Amino acid sequence: MNDRQIKVGIFMGSKSDLPIVNEAAKILDYFGISNEINILSAHRSPHAVVKTLEKLEKQGAKLFIASAGMAAHLAGVIAAHTHKPVLGIPLGGGDLNGIDSLLSTVQMPKVYL
């Protein structure tokens, strides 16, 4: 990995989320906004999520995007470890067809600094 300045850190919970995340990266690329995609699970590798987040912040990241399905805790884990904005993208799937990920994402507590 090089030391280029990353403006947006993109996280996804599993490789199956890549088609959605790639669309976000394409839009950022179109506007010349540097970004980096990371495949990390908030449940299986929370320490790796935090370590990657810290690395991206050192590289100048100003925003984070977190894409996850079902329990969708990825955005919350990232938000708990940064003061920068985190955009959550709930994904469909599972027994509830994405309702669980939608609720997990939109009902995260507000943070007051």
Image (cartoon, rainbow, N blue to C red):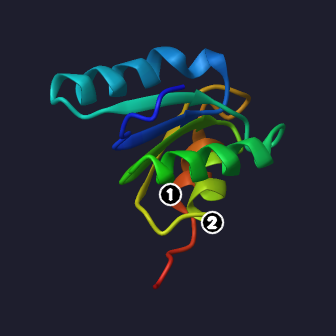
SS category of the residue bearing label 1 = helix
- Residue in view at x 36 percent, y 54 percent: 62
Q: x%, y% of residue 80?
A: 63, 66
Position of residue 7 in the picture relative to residue 64 (left or right): left
Task: Please name the residue shown 62% across and 64% down the image.
Answer: 81
Residue 21 is marked as none
Residue, far right: 44
Q: In the rendered view, would you say 76 is above or below 94?
A: below
Query: According to the image, label 2 marks what residue?
Result: 80
Question: Tags 2 and 1 in contact by the CB under 8 Å rule?
Answer: no
Can you tell which of label 2 and label 1 is closer to the viewer?
A: 2
The residue furthest bottom is: 113
Viewed as shown, does residue 103 lie left or right of 14?
left
Q: CA distance from mark 2 to mark 1?
A: 15 Å
**Front-most of residues 48 and 102:** 48
Can you tell which quarter of the image residue 23 is in?
top left
Q: Position of residue 112 (x, y in %)?
A: 47, 84
Where, quadrant-wise, is the N terminus in this rendering? top right
Mark 1 sits on what residue?
106
Q: Amino acid at mark 1?
A: Val
17 shown above or below 107: above
Number of residues whose C-alpha sits closer than 10 Å to that of mark 1, classed few (under 14), some (14–19) or many (20 or more): few
Residue type beneath disc 2: Ala
> What percent of the width, then of the height, locates residue 107?
55, 63
List x then y, in percent, for residue 83.
48, 69
Secondary element under disc 2, as helix, strand or loop, is loop
Q: Residue at x 73, y 36 (%)?
A: 41
- Up-down relation of residue 49 to residue 81 (above or below): above
